[in-house]
Amino acid sequence: MRRQDYEIPKNLIFETRDIIDMRGLNLTLLLNPPDFDDILDKPAKITRAQLKLKFSVLSKEILAQGEVAGKASLQCSRCLETFEAEYKEEFTRLYSIKDEIIDIMSITKQTLALLADIQNLCRPDCKGLCSFCGANKNETQCGCKPPVFSQFACLKDLKTKE
């Protein structure tokens, strides 16, 4: 089989025999973002995804090296605004030449799952929302003043007799 005649499987599940026959494979392709809708928690979603993949045939194994890059629409953890962020994640896996298939789709999904940060910020200095009126502090100064809490406030009305 010649590399230029090889049709890349849409589900990214490769036949090991094909990779061995071609003595490896290098490819770059755009992925379909809706295929990854189940990876990130809503409202976050992948908006663009590109895969660079290189298969190298070793003596008893096949080395798969990949890079998934693109854009994701995320929600800021502080102000709740939606913003676009670029990402680039790499992966490396070894497969036995005895395996019948090489499932790159599952590795790609696992790699994209790494985008789910604990805290996504639209910008490093995001001021967040006012905890009293809910205004976005990045856009407006609401003027709310937080109440002063004192653990001794209950004692102010106590009087001592002398």
Image: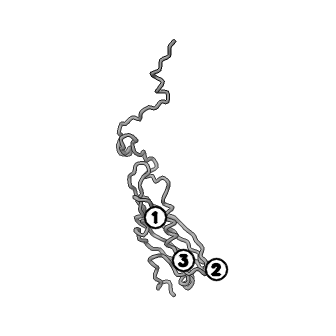
| Residue 78 located left or right of residue 1 | left
Q: CA distance from mark 1 to mark 2?
A: 33 Å
Circles 1 and 2, Cβ within 8 Å, touching? The answer is: no
The x and y percentages for residue 100 are 56, 81
Q: Amino acid at mark 1?
A: Ile
Which callout, 1 or 2, points at the residue further toward the start of the chain? 1
Q: Foreground residue, 31 or 131?
A: 131
Q: Residues within 10 Å of mark 2 (few under 14, many from 20)?
A: few
Residue at numbered disc 2: 60
Q: CA distance from mark 1 to mark 3?
A: 20 Å
The x and y percentages for residue 77 are 44, 51
Residue at numbered disc 3: 102
102 w.r.t. 152: above or below: below
What colouring style does the render use? Answer: one colour
User: SS at mark 1?
Assistant: loop
| Residue 45 location, quadrant | bottom left
Q: Residues within 10 Å of mark 3 (few under 14, many from 20)?
A: many
Q: Amino acid at mark 3?
A: Ile
Q: Residues within 10 Å of mark 1 (few under 14, many from 20)?
A: some
Identify the residue shown where x is 46% and y is 76%.
11
Query: Outermost residue, top direction?
Result: 162
Identify the residue shown where x is 49% and y is 67%.
109
The x and y percentages for residue 82 are 38, 55
User: SS at mark 3?
Assistant: strand
Which callout, 3 or 2, points at the residue further toward the start of the chain? 2
- Say the numbered circle drawn on residue 39: 1
| Circle count | 3
User: SS at mark 2?
Assistant: loop
Of labels 1 and 2, the one closer to you: 1
- Say the numbered circle drawn on residue 72: none
Identify the residue shown where x is 55% and y is 68%.
91
